[in-house]
Amino acid sequence: MEGERKSKGERGQGTGRWHTRGGRVVGGDRRIPSYGGDYRYAREDKGVEVQLLLFESFGGFGKGVREILRRAADVLQNKLTRAQYLDEVTWTTKSWLGLQKQRISVVLHTAIAEQVVNELACGGGGRVHGAKEFRCKILKKSELSASPPSQESLRRLPCCNAPTQPADALPSAPDLGVSETKLEPPSPPAVELDGKLELWRKRGGGDLEPVLASSAVAVLDAQWVISHAEAGGVLTHRQALPKEAFLSFADLVEATGEYGYLPVAALSYPWLTKDHPDPRGANLARVARALKALLSDHPVFGKPVNPRLGVFWDFGSLHQHPDPPNGVLRTEEQNALFKQGLSCLGTLYSHPKTYVLRLTSFPDGHKAEDQAEGTNVAKYFDRGWCSTENAWASLTKAGQLSLDLGKMRAGVEYGYGSLIDDCVQDGGRRPPLLPSAFAAELEKKSFTNGKDDKPLVKQLYEAAFKEQFGKATVLNYRGLGWGDAEAAQLAEVLASGAAPRLERLELQRNKIGDEGCKALAAALGKEGAAPRLETLSLGENKIGDEGCKALAAALGKEGAAPRLKELYLFCNEIGDEGCKALAAALKEGAAPSLKARDAPLATRPSPAQCSSHLPSRAVSLRGQQGAA
């Protein structure tokens, strides 16, 4: 976006100047007349005054700007109960570190515009702006991140011409169709929350912030779901739920634990009737059992992985038709938010650190033949949306984050570990599909509204596939019961070059044999398929000599896995012939980056013979740190 240019002399070398212009935005992508440029505004649905802030810097300004803007975003999202978050703030700050001689434009809500301008122009995080007409009030960083803005600070800079819209005139949360709870200030101290926010974003939570901060999506409190189920309740549509049913974004940040996962779970399940997904509360009770287990103490850590959990359940998280049989439908505004929410689902389900809970079976007592005409009675794996959610969850998540609740046993009081054990192994977790393969499969699936939904989910799946594999550095597919067919399907994805940043591939504790190993070897032997792969773990499978020979041949190809440092083949069925082939390949220069190890080789059936074949490189052929 272009702004009015200033001459170099007017700006001053090594200084920056803020210029502000006001503009009223009403929904969607709009044009700012005074700048003549396009800018996307975080999907505002009502008239909201914003400030376009143009900062011209000729000296660079370092990471302080990024941190201040992030805190400003948090202020607006978490501290103001009557303002809607503009998520462009966080989307555009990632590439701002160390910029030199560049013009930067950012749209901020009027409610925090002056705070940010003052802090950047005059405060400790920025340079002196050098413009005398700017009568700035100095704000400390602590004020910006820890205190709600005062009415005084809501005023705009004196050089701006448009009138300011006070905070109490901004659309309220109910106006936007979301509980006030979602925007209430957090209860923990600001310093503690800042630390949690850093942890949240370290886990990739920043990818979810546009979703969770929008009024299109709300997440349910897992504890509320459990209590509601134990009281014999039935879930109602989002608009009728009490505010205590929801968790705010600040609640989720505070609940971020130290064990690597985000406190967010997305539910995937088939609706039981046309107008209500669970009219008897049977699925509510099943989901509550699983949530109770996920919130229990971890068997190793001795405390919950996450103390609280936010649940995306479409009926309670997206705006619904309140009473379709009687003609009570979503409002036009709610319908727009509903469609916006659908566009966010790929991120929720495919994120590598969120849980996906899959109800792949119908509850006891449900009969398809009893349903009204027009009801989609297809089973989980035959439904379009369920298949899509399952495919999203199968992209880059670790196995324990995609749980098949259809595997839960009746009458069992689950803990965290036992739930994982029952719902992961052979739990319907498929290998990832290329977008073309997914699109072909989707043609066979059942949709209630296939004309509109089918092209949408194809687009959303492809976007999620590219995003998640494009940034994946670790793929953990351990203990999923995969055999040769699944290995071959994964090999197609790897051969496509979809994971250029992949550093570690974990496939141990599966059922992969020679054919599956051959498929993986062919993929990894393709130049450019795994340019950064450092660790390949194939231990505890059923790989024999033929698979090991194929792997040796693949590693010997020019450009194949050039950075491979560790190869794990322990507890397979590899004999002397496989060892000889691998030894020969390594001696001829295959996988030159494999590190030396001190531990002796231990393999079967003849450790001594294999020791004589393989050089002292990091090839582990059996547990106990065995390496050759």
Image (cartoon, rainbow, N blue to C red):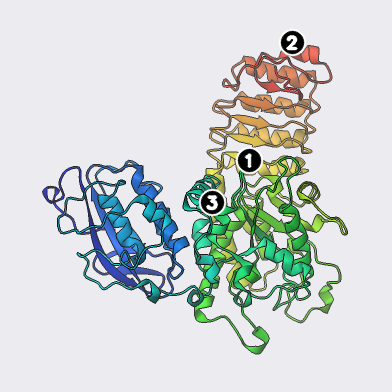
Q: Is the C terminus in the top left, top right, bottom left or bottom right quadrant? A: top right
Residue identified by numbered label 2? 612
Q: Which of 429 and 420 is in front in this view?
A: 420
Location of residue 590 with respect to 421 vertically, above or below:
above
Q: Nearer the viewer, residue 447 or 194?
A: 194
- Quarter of image, res 181: bottom right
Disc 1 element: strand
Q: Residue 475 carries which label?
A: 1
Disc 3 element: helix
Residue at the spot 41% in from the left edge and 75% down from the top edge: 46
Badge 3: residue crowd in 10 Å (few <14, some 14–19, many ≥20):
many
- Cα separation between marks 3 and 1: 18 Å
Q: Which mark is residue 205?
A: 3
Amino acid type, mark 2: Ser
Q: Which of marks 1 and 2 is nearer the N terminus?
A: 1
- Quarter of image, res 493: top right
Residue at the spot 44% in from the left edge and 73% down from the top edge: 45
Badge 2: residue crowd in 10 Å (few <14, some 14–19, many ≥20):
some
Q: Nearer the viewer, residue 502 or 289?
A: 289
Do residues under tags 1 and 2 come within 8 Å of each other at their CB atoms? no
Q: Is the N terminus in the top left, top right, bottom left or bottom right quadrant? A: bottom left
Amino acid type, mark 1: Leu
Disc 2 element: helix
- Cα separation between marks 3 and 2: 49 Å
Residue at the spot 79% in from the left edge and 18% down from the top edge: 576
Q: Earlier in the sequence, mark 3 or mark 1?
A: 3
